[in-house]
Image (tube, coloured by chain):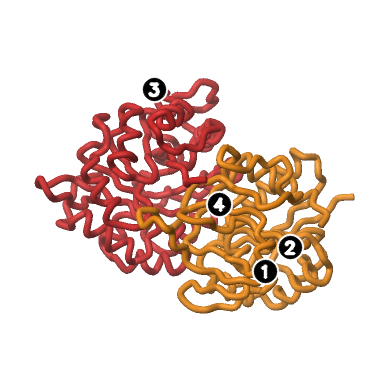
């Protein structure tokens, strides 16, 4: 009996639709997040992540409906992030059926928010998302606004800080690798994972199944998050699991 | 006759997805059961089966439960007095303990004597919370585990917790999992049972266990 490495497909949702769609056979509406969630549930994904990239705050109500319909159709854990700024935002997401809320910019601006959220809802449902970029050979900094704005904060020290404030998990994205398909930033991932006692989810850069393996074996991540390789049908979840299991990782095989 | 199952609502998170999982298990297994999410002690007292969910911190959940007038008394009456089948989930299971030691010492319901304490894995490299999918090792046979494949090659359950219940009586432990040492995954004594993992998030294993609970006559 061992805790298994998790594979987490992440869906970018804008105005209630999956951005760019999900390329699965048999999917009636590739742009419907609930349909995509059901397909990943059936495929054996270990968790699912929705990242809401809706620009205007007024339009974010649609997301709660999507989360609610997903939670009623899929009996798997669901993390939702994007624009989570207040304790009330988290409460609404959890009430809609999310299992974890992912906070990013709001935690950068006000660290105490992490503590308040963890005390209110429990560490287990508070994920702190960190977007990091390498700025020198030995230093990675926290960035916001999709990697455009530098904060001057050291990513490893920040990870340690949010963990001590009560975060239950860190979702770590390398902005250098995001979309590049050249693999995770393993050095960054390992430094963060080794610095904290909470699980770290590696994100950003997956192009092959070997990249998923490396994220765990070399990056020391507890879970791997990927988007395009699954959405575009390059690989299926069962293929990814089989590959990681063959490489010696403990996986939950269907 | 249609039976009723009450999922106790005391402000601890979203219960609609849990209710959906129970509804689906009931429909798929042909067990006509009305699933009610309720904060009404009267309804809990009348229900044929009772589920106590719980997410968050032990003390918060206890406070939430106490904040519903008459709820603890209704549970005592239905479960302890009326011997109705009861399932606690996650912190809902932990609340069965004598005490919770999370942040502060908080009294539990005391139905499964024991303490709820921080998980201390024997391997310092292991992460806390124990978050994700793990298998179960059954300590004995039980109706709730009928058709649920256990052992290292068995089905997986979804866990997310930093604290674990250690019952005083080893026989109260129905199943364990492993995370740097054995952790209580399920407890059962008489008509009282609990799962540390979330059956409503545990896909195949969860739906089977829920169906078993709907069938269970302790």
Could you say which disc has been placed on residue A234 in the image?
3
Q: Of A71 and A239, which appears nearest the observer?
A: A239
Determine whether, in the image, residue B75 is placed left or right of residue A166: right
Crowd band around label 4 with a 10 angstrom C-alpha radius: few (<14), some (14–19), many (20+): many
Can marks 1 and 2 be said to lie on one chain?
A: yes
Could you say which disc has been placed on residue B189 in the image?
2
The chain carrying label 4 is B
Q: CA distance from mark 3 to mark 2?
A: 49 Å
Q: Is residue B159 above or below residue B98?
A: above
Q: Of B203 and A101, which appears nearest the observer?
A: B203
Can marks 2 and 4 be said to lie on one chain?
A: yes
Q: CA distance from mark 1 to mark 2?
A: 8 Å
The chain carrying label 3 is A
Q: The C terminus of chain A is located in which quarter?
A: top right
Could you say which disc has been placed on residue B5 in the image?
none
- The local secondary structure at tag 1 comes to loop
Residue A110 placement (x, y as % from top left): 28, 65
The chain carrying label 1 is B
Of label 1 and label 2, which has the lower sequence position?
1
Could you say which disc has been placed on residue B112 in the image?
1
- The local secondary structure at tag 3 comes to loop
Crowd band around label 3 with a 10 angstrom C-alpha radius: few (<14), some (14–19), many (20+): some
Could you say which disc has been placed on residue B177 in the image?
4
The chain carrying label 2 is B
- The local secondary structure at tag 2 comes to strand
For chain A, give the colour: red
Can marks 1 and 4 be said to lie on one chain?
A: yes
């Amino acid at each position: 009996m061992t805790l298994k490495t998790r594979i987490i497909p992440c869906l970018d949702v804008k105005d209630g639709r999956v951005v760019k769609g999900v390329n699965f056979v048999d999917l009636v509406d590739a742009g419907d997040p609930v349909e995509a969630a059901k397909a990943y549930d059936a495929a054996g994904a270990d968790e699912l992540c929705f990242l809401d990239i809706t620009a205007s705050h007024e339009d974010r109500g649609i997301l709660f409906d999507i989360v609610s319909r997903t939670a009623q159709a899929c009996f798997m854990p669901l993390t939702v992030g994007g624009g989570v700024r207040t304790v009330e935002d988290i409460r609404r997401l959890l009430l809609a059926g999310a299992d974890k809320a992912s906070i990013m910019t709001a935690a950068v601006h006000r660290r105490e928010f992490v503590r308040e959220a963890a005390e209110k809802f429990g560490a287990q449902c508070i994920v702190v998302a960190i977007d990091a970029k390498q700025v020198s050979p030995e230093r990675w900094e926290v960035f916001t606004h999709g990697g455009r704005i530098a904060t001057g904060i050291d990513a490893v020290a920040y990870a340690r800080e949010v963990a001590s404030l009560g975060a239950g998990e860190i979702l770590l994205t390398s902005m250098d690798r995001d979309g590049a398909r050249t693999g995770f930033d393993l050095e960054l991932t390992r430094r963060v994972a080794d610095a904290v006692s909470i699980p770290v989810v590696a994100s950003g850069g997956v192009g092959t199944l070997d990249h998923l393996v490396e994220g765990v074996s070399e990056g020391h991540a507890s879970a791997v998050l990927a988007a395009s390789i699954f959405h575009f049908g390059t690989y299926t979840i069962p293929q990814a699991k089989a590959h990681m299991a063959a490489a010696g990782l403990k996986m939950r095989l269907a | 006759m249609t039976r009723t199952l009450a999922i106790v609502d005391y402000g601890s998170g979203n219960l609609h997805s849990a209710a959906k999982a129970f509804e689906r298990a009931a429909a798929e297994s042909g067990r006509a059961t009305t699933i009610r999410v309720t904060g009404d002690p009267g309804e809990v007292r009348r229900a044929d089966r009772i589920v106590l969910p719980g997410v968050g911190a032990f003390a918060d959940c206890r406070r939430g439960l106490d904040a519903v007038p008459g709820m603890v008394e209704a549970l005592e009456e239905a479960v302890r007095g009326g011997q109705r089948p009861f399932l606690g989930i996650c912190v809902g299971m932990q609340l069965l303990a004598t005490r919770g030691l999370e942040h502060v010492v908080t009294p539990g319901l005391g139905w499964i004597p024991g303490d709820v304490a921080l998980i201390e894995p024997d391997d310092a490299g292991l992460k806390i919370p124990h978050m994700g999918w793990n298998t179960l090792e059954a300590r004995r046979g039980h109706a709730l585990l009928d058709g649920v494949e256990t052992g290292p090659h068995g089905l997986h359950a979804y866990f997310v917790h930093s604290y674990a219940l250690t019952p005083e009586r080893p026989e109260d432990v129905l199943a364990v999992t492993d995370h740097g040492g054995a952790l209580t995954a399920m407890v059962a004594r008489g008509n009282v049972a609990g799962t540390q993992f979330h059956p409503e998030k545990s896909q195949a294993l969860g739906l089977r266990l829920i169906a078993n609970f709907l069938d269970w006559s302790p």
